[in-house]
Amino acid sequence: MADLIPILSYVTFFLCFAVIFAVMALGLNLQWGFTGLFNVGVAGFVAVGAYTSAILTAPPYPDSLGGFGLPVAAGWVGAMIMSGLVALVVGVAALRLRHDYLAITTFGVAVTLQLVALNARWLTGGPFGLQFIPKPFQDLLGTGLAWNMAYLAMSLAVLGLVYVALERLVKSPFGRVLRAIREDETAAEALGKRAFSFRLQSFVIGCMVMGLGGALYAHFVGYIAPEDFLPILTFQIWTMLIVGGSGNNRGAIAGALAVWLLWSLSGTVLRQIIPQSEQARGAALQIVLIGVILAAMLIWRPRGLVGEVIGTPAGKDEKGNTGKKA
């Protein structure tokens, strides 16, 4: 039994990260999969959520503003609110742009936020980051397997709530308008829908979910620094969504699990076969591997592992039954 504890610890550690990434991917799926918003600034909004929750909940820091000692739940709520406010400001200024221009703008916002985290030492700790971020249940369970399992259960509950909320949202009239805007914004406006307003709401809600994912990450690892929110994080989340299947919340979750599994396994294999002096190149090979997988999925299975359900033929239900009795 003692031999299984390290394995269980690693599995729960792995699953916690997968669940956190799944939350982030769900936020991106609302923006891209259902609304067609090309947001390449995911890492920036994740960083806003992570730093906000850390600053609100951590003990006072001697050299920075951080440390209000609030409950973790308050930190999560604050992370969502702050990410939403930042998204509102960015969205009002940027969402009138389209496609490549919106991507460039959101990427620039993400880089700017990362640089703010790097240089605003009085607020974020600068390059040294923020330490001693409280972990829920740590006083009761310690930091071993029991705590990992408890955090995994809590993260799964959060993921379930986010999934249910987004499913209800996208299946409501609001969600149908989002899909109409994604397919043909001009036609949606001709029917009296204010496309910009709906795009902005989708952008803000998606970024709030990303901020929640950042808060989950911060309280899981207990330490955050600017290098945690580099553009590679955005690349990972986009890959998870495309591999899993955009426009389907189950696909976003499946993609997060699949890509994180490949990322972890490839890292382990490369560390075993590449000499210690060449480990930096091994990290670059991981990025190349994920890029190859993404390209292959776009060629051979563009809808992803669990693609969007476009609709069913007239007279049939989702299982293909005609509804006629024998």
Image (cartoon, rainbow, N blue to C red):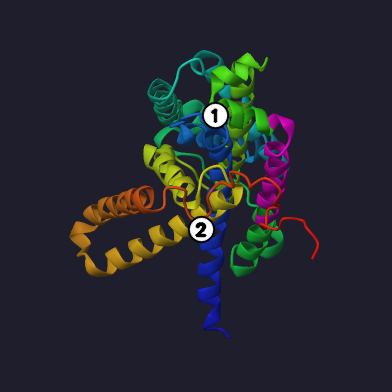
Q: What residue is pinned by disc 2?
A: 257
Task: Check disc 2: other Cα within 10 Å, few if <14, some if 14-19, many if 20+.
Answer: many
Is residue 171 found inside the magenta-colored segment of the image? Answer: yes
Looking at the rendered structure, the kind of residue marked 2 is: Leu
Establish if 55 lies above or below 186.
below
Query: x, y (%) of residue 241?
Result: 49, 46
**What numbered label is drawn on residue 182?**
1
Q: Residue at coordinates 51% horizontally, 58% vertically from top-left? A: 257
Q: Secondary structure at mark 2?
A: helix
Q: Looking at this view, is 39 or 15 the one in front? A: 39
Is residue 147 found inside the magenta-colored segment of the image? Answer: no
Query: x, y (%) of residue 140?
Result: 72, 62
Q: Which residues are magenta?
A: 156-174
Q: Looking at this view, is 127 or 199 the one in front? A: 199
Q: Residue at coordinates 26% horizontally, 50% vertically from top-left? A: 284
Establish if 155 lies above or below 11.
above
**What numbered label is drawn on residue 2?**
none
Q: Which quarter shows the N terminus? A: bottom right
Query: x, y (%) of residue 285?
Result: 26, 54
Q: Are marks 1 and 2 in contact (CB under 8 Å)?
A: no
Looking at the rendered structure, the kind of residue marked 1 is: Arg
Query: x, y (%) of residue 105?
Result: 41, 21
Estimate the spatial distance between the alpha carbons at disc 1 and disc 2, rounded to whole Å.
26 Å
Q: Secondary structure at mark 1?
A: helix
Q: Which quarter shows the C terminus? A: bottom right
Q: Residue at coordinates 46% horizontally, 44% vertically from top-left? A: 237
Mark 1 or mark 2: whose residue is earlier in sequence: 1
